[in-house]
Image (tube, coloured by chain):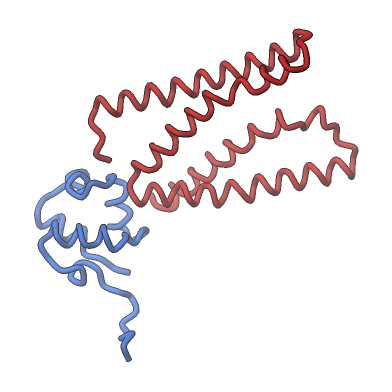
Chain colours: A blue, B red
């Protein structure tokens, strides 16, 4: 799964540590999500969306573009 | 993640304190059981001496794990997933080697083998941390 966390963070000029503190997670977690080595839980994804005042799907994009409803 | 500084210091003192007390009890029990001729029930009591501080240490470790964020909990889960099969492999190989070569239980008894388990866990943590670094 790809994500725009690094871009959104850079737009706000926040450090990884600042984002981590605002989300209540470790800096390693923010780094692992940014580098796409770790996919966050839905709870953390919602927190990220709220923090950046956007929708989850604007931060995370699935590699699989197929529609599961089809 | 949301601990106050005073709570963190208290937890660290309790955690490391219980670890030190446990290690001292374990080493003390080893010395007492090897060097002194103790009565039967006293020997058992001395052998069980490290249990209370270890239970306290375990409760501090669990509290610490519960305070971790989701990535670090996953790292510790993966560490267990690595350490457990390694422990099974070690015990299995030692059992077979005992049959194959007459490996002396005095050289590879419980008191020598347990130390490998936290080492395996530490290896698991290192492997998992590298994966998410």
- Compared with A7, B120 (above or below) is above
Which residue is pictured at 25% across the width and 25% down the height? Answer: B6
Place of residue B124 in the rendered image (x, y in percent of width and height, measured from the top left): 53, 45
Question: Which of the two residues, A53 or A34, is positioned nearer the viewer here?
Answer: A53
Question: Which of the two residues, B100 or A16, is positioned nearer the viewer here?
Answer: B100
Place of residue B121 in the rendered image (x, y in percent of width and height, measured from the top left): 55, 41
Which residue is pictured at 14% across the width and 60% down the height? Answer: A50
Place of residue A55 in the rendered image (x, y in percent of width and height, measured from the top left): 15, 69
Task: Tell me where residue A12 sits by quadrant.
Answer: bottom left
Task: Tell me where residue B12 sits by quadrant.
Answer: top left
- The quadrant in which the C terminus of chain A is found is bottom left
Residue lying farthest to the front in this orientation? B41
Q: How many labels were placed on the picture? A: 0
Residue lying farthest to the bottom in this orientation? A70
- The quadrant in which the N terminus of chain A is found is bottom left
Question: Which of the two residues, B130 or B49, is positioned nearer the viewer here?
Answer: B49
Which residue is pictured at 26% across the width and 60% down the height? Answer: A43
Left or right placement of residue A21 versus residue B8 in this view: left
Residue lying farthest to the top in this orientation? B36
Left or right placement of residue B73 versus residue B121 in this view: left
Which residue is pictured at 71% across the width and 21% down the height? Answer: B44
Task: Tell me where residue B35 sits by quadrant.
Answer: top right
Place of residue A68 in the rendered image (x, y in percent of width and height, measured from the top left): 33, 85
């Amino acid at each position: 799964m790809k994500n725009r966390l690094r871009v959104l963070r850079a737009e706000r000029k926040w450090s990884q540590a600042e984002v981590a503190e605002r989300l209540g997670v470790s800096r390693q977690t923010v780094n692992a999500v940014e580098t796409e080595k770790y996919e966050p839980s839905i709870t953390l994804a919602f927190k990220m969306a709220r923090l950046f005042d956007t929708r989850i799907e604007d931060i995370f994009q699935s590699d699989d573009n197929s529609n599961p409803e089809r | 993640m949301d601990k106050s500084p005073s709570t963190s210091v208290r937890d660290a003192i309790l955690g490391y304190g219980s670890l030190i007390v446990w290690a001292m009890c374990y080493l003390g029990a080893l010395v007492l059981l090897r060097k002194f001729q103790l009565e039967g029930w006293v020997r058992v009591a001395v052998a069980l001496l490290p249990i209370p501080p270890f239970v306290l240490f375990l409760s501090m470790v669990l509290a610490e794990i519960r305070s971790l964020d989701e990535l670090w909990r996953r790292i510790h889960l993966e560490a267990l997933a690595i350490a457990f099969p390694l422990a099974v492999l070690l015990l299995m190989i030692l059992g077979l080697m005992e049959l194959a070569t007459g490996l002396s239980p005095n050289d590879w008894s419980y008191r020598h083998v347990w130390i490998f388990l936290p080492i395996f866990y530490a290896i698991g943590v290192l492997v998992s941390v590298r994966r998410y670094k």
